[in-house]
Image (tube, rainbow, N blue to C red):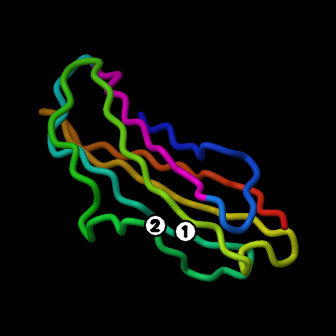
Amino acid sequence: MLMYAADRRLARPGETVVFTAWVINETGRCLKGVRLVPGSLTNEALDVLQFLPLPRPNGQFIGRLGKFETAYRSFSYLVTARDQLNDGELLSGMRVIGRSAFREFHDEHDAVVAVRG
């Protein structure tokens, strides 16, 4: 299971928003090859934005998650003046991929932050 959220609901230009993804192994089986793959990060104008530091192109490798274990990774974004145009929002998507002995799994979630001047 993936939980994904920002550290704030409202941000202003010059502030840093931290997006955190928690991967929770609820299966009772060991999971392997677990990795987070950041999706799009956009503002109201649909500009393609970048986390700082940049995540690796193949995602954030977590590796093995034992029975009922949890792992997390955080990603930061510095809000700009352009992000506040039209009282916009930041939208960030995140996906987790992994496998157990029996099947592959994935989960995906979005996090939204309002931007005001």
Is 63 left or right of 93, judged from the image as shown? left
Query: Which circle, 2 or 1, is nearer the viewer?
Result: 2
Could you tell which of marks 2 and 1 lies nearer the N-terminus?
1
**Residue type, mark 2 in image:** Phe
Q: Secondary structure at mark 1?
A: strand
Whether residue 83 sits left or right of residue 64 in the image: it is right
Disc 2 and disc 1 in contact, CB within 8 angstroms: yes
User: Is residue 13 part of the magenta span, yes or no?
Assistant: no
Task: Look at 74% across and 74% down and name the residue there.
Answer: 44
Q: Quick one: quadrant of the C terminus?
A: bottom right
In front here: 50 or 95? Answer: 50
Image-based side of 85 in relation to 25, left or right: right
The quadrant where residue 2 appears:
top left
Which range of residues does the magenta coloring cover?
Answer: 16-27
* Relative to 52, residue 18 above or below: above
- Residue 41, numbered label: 1
Looking at the magenta stretch, what is its main secondary structure? strand
Who's the residue at 48% across and 44% down the image?
20
Disc 2: which residue: 51
**How many marks do you count on the picture?**
2
